[in-house]
Amino acid sequence: MKISCTQCGAEQVVLESNFFLRCPYCDARIIVDPPENTPALVEPAVSEEYVRRLFSSGVVSSVEVKFFPYLEKVLSSGREIQSCFSQPWQELEDYIPPSGDRKIFDKSLAEPDQLIPFDRDMAEESGSRVIFHPFYVVMLKLEGYGEGLLVDGVSGKIIGEPPVIEEQNDSGQNLYRTFLITLAAGLIFTVPIYFLTKDFDESWLSWIWTFILIVPLTLAFYHFKIKAGRR
């Protein structure tokens, strides 16, 4: 399908699933042939800062809000809602988003690249209203999460299971930190003791050095035992 920009008149080819886009020539925002019922957009109820606090410090690479299209039909028994994404999203396959503060769609409410394209044929056949629901796409600095996780922009709920590897990374960092602290403490105690005991009998030295090695290792062992008990 071809359209002409309402601002500069440039002709461009758009996909049938496109509803809201930006002109690559003049940067104008264009609404393309909206469905019969004007779409609504649900405003996020949680902030980006709130979403970042759901994860451990330092593991979040980026956070971006996206609006996913759903079809809503009002029935006497309540509302019926189903996804109408132009491309499947496995994470949201069985997820029903909650209601939120919605507004009639306007160009000022979102940027074109924030809207996930909807299946136009599905929307027109059902006759239901298109509702864009907010989700935060969270990219993590962890191997195996290149596609990111989703957080519901209204409830603040993480979709799916949070990464278990996050705890493993924290444990590794704690182990490394404890090793450095133990090493530094050992050097602080062993250097003066060496000069004080260098004239002692060798049997006394062996006992002293054994004591110096056992104490920090015992402290490190109990440190991790207590940490493991708290989890």
Image (cartoon, helix red, strand yellow):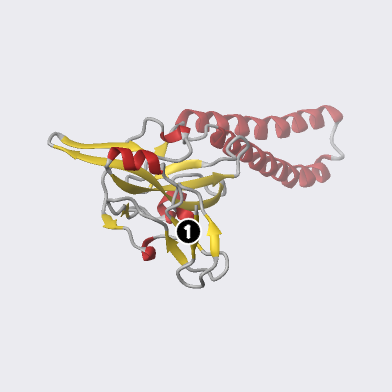
- Measured as percent of width and height from the top left, residue 89 is found at 47, 36
Q: Residue furthest left?
A: 76
In the image, taking residue 198 as reference, residue 96 lies left or right, namely: left
Q: Which of the 4 quarters of the picture holds residue 161?
A: top left
The answer to which of 139 and 131 lies nearer the viewer is 131
In the image, taking residue 225 as reference, residue 116 lies left or right, namely: left
Residue plotted at (77% across, 32% down): 209
Q: Which of the 4 quarters of the picture holds residue 102?
A: bottom left
The answer to which of 50 and 174 lies nearer the viewer is 50
- What secondary structure is found at the residue carrying circle 1? strand
- Residue 160 can be seen in this image: yes
Residue under circle 1? 21
- Residue 53 can be seen in this image: no
- Measured as percent of width and height from the top left, residue 184 is found at 71, 45
* Circle 1: residue type: Leu
**Total label count?**
1
- Measured as percent of width and height from the top left, residue 153 is found at 37, 48
With respect to residue 93, does 3 lie above or below?
A: below
* Badge 1: residue crowd in 10 Å (few <14, some 14–19, many ≥20): some
Q: Which of the 4 quarters of the picture holds residue 125?
A: top left
- Measured as percent of width and height from the top left, residue 174 is found at 60, 39
The answer to which of 71 and 50 lies nearer the viewer is 71
